[in-house]
Amino acid sequence: MASIPERAQVVIVGGGIVGCSIAYHLTLRGWTDVVLLERKQLTSGTTWHAAGLVGQLRATHNLTRLAQYTTELYATLEKETGQATGFRQIGSLALAASEGRLEELKRGASMARCFGLEASVLTPAQAKELWPLVSTEGLLGAVHLPRDGQTNPIDTTQALAKGARSRGAQIFENVKVSEILVSKGRATGVRTAEGDVEAEYVVNCAGMWAHELGKQAGVSIPLHAAEHFYVVTEAIPGLPRHLPVLRDADACTYVKEDAGKLLVGWFEPKAKPWGMEGIPESFAFDSLPDDLEHIEPLLEAAIKRVPALGGAGIQLFFNGPESFTPDNRYLLGESPEIRRLFVAAGFNSIGIQSAGGAGKVLADWIIDGHPPMDLSDVDIRRTMPFQRNRKYLKDRTVEVLGLLYAMHWPFRQPESSRGVRKSALHDRLAARGACFGEAAGWERANWFAPPGVSPTYEYSYGRQNWFAHSAEEHKAVRERVGLFDQSSFGKFILEGPDGGARRSRRLYAMAQRPRRHRSGPDCDPRK
Ligand SMILES: Cc1cc2nc3c(=O)[nH]c(=O)nc-3n(C[C@H](O)[C@H](O)[C@H](O)COP(=O)(O)OP(=O)(O)OC[C@H]3O[C@@H](n4cnc5c(N)ncnc54)[C@H](O)[C@@H]3O)c2cc1C
């Protein structure tokens, strides 16, 4: 085996689908002096066991654009590289068994159409035509996205690696990065048992190991692994081929047809965090122990929706770890703590469908020195140092996995790991009936319940319970006076040799600006 080079323009740590996609996209833009180091074998972390669902609709336009790009890339990768990927554009079908869910799906469908995705709202009978094994009992409707797909994660990763290699990237397996080297606040390379590799840029794509690797360099990468379960049935006689991926979020379930069998997986409301004592050094292509008690109620709910599952033998009970972040969005970009140290990790069970787009924009970001589009949804600069805390991450992970299929209510607040940062006024605000939301770990008073009303959210897609109370507050501020606790808001420190002078000039200029909205005897601008 060739030995690792002493220097490279970019060193990528981690040979999962994300690291390989970044190597693919850097080389696509002509940056070919790229070295990828993988501690075991490519895909041996989380990627190998993924179910391979490739959905395109995400919560925002930009994230949807990235997932759309992933689909386009996977559809052409085999032709470009000669490596089969198993990608099939068979579509997806999302079911609604409650009014709220139907509303959510309909809103999703109209958003999808605005983003240029095909989407149709179906009746339960139409859904059954597409997925004949589904029971329509309790179903209110469904949404069909015909261009969604599924892929083979191992083969797709190998195709990305092959594309990167063909343009000059060097990929080394069985080379573990023990340390990210930093000098004067800038990443300068990595240390391995085979020697150091000097680099202009280092990219941490170490999956669930990324947290520890980042911590050692003083970088916060808040993610925690959780167990994720699926089963694969034995072959089901007469099972139609090319069924769309089925999502019954009200039953926490997804179902994928594969080679005459069904793969059934779950995003349950109370997940099982994993790896609290660290991830074993030997971990590669490993799975975690079964937990039949944990999945039994989930399996029962899935059988209600797809009764054929009840009669099918189970060939495989699978449990594998995946990393989750406190806000269920992945972490991408240059770390705020160390320049030229980039991160792409914490993919919250959508790493296969995100890898194409995330790899492309991160490569652009490295090469151009800025993100190619608004990536604030996933920008790692949104994270806070306190989020390194293990207990905070573990407790939040119990909730976060289930949020993938929970109702995505407007204003929904996390329930776990709360109360991390409280302002000096917290108790006084609580005594006045504040209903708190979370902002960067702060407890922020979002609205005030009048006496006799409970300060808790009642979520819906309609007008929520706080509306009238918030309106009262708004009116009070407009017509009388309001006092805002701004502890949770960002503050800027202006530093530098003449920072003070500039600041005073700016404040002076602001003070001189005419205030057209201020008038009357009580509004003397000098006060
Ligand atoms: C059961 C299950 C089903 C899933 N199904 C889907 C799905 O249907 N669709 C979807 O989009 N996503 C799915 N996912 C999620 C998806 O698998 C992950 O998000 C994705 O694989 C993450 O890829 P990665 O490259 O970030 O991490 P990984 O694949 O874990 O890659 C990280 C790599 O870094 C290496 N590494 C770590 N530390 C070092 C070091 N110090 N030096 C060198 N190398 C190092 C590791 O060995 C590993 O190979 C699923 C996950 C699970 C668990």
Image (spheres, helix red, strand yellow):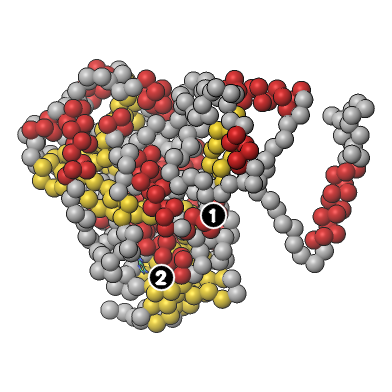
At numbered mark 1, what does the secondary structure look like: helix, strand or loop?
loop
Residue lying at 35% horizontally and 36% vertically, measured from the top left: 405
For residue 139, above or below residue 445: above
Q: Quadrant of the N terminus?
A: bottom left
Q: Tell which of 34 and 219 is nearer to you.
A: 219
Residue lying at 57% horizontally and 60% vertically, measured from the top left: 336
Q: Look at label 2 and name its amino acid.
A: Val
Q: Is residue 156 left or right of residue 524?
A: left
Quarter location, residue 3: bottom left
Position in image of residue 80 (x %, y %)? 33, 54
- Which of marks 1 and 2 precedes in the sequence? 2
The residue at which mark 1 appears reads as: 384
Q: Look at label 1 and name its amino acid.
A: Met
Q: Tell which of 139 and 169 is nearer to you.
A: 139
Position in image of residue 401 (x %, y %)? 35, 44
Residue lying at 50% horizontally and 41% vertically, measured from the top left: 62
Residue lying at 19% horizontally and 48% vertically, measured from the top left: 291
The residue at which mark 2 appears reads as: 35
- Where ligand 1 lies, by quadrant? bottom left
Quarter location, residue 511: top right
Position in image of residue 167 (x %, y %)? 39, 65
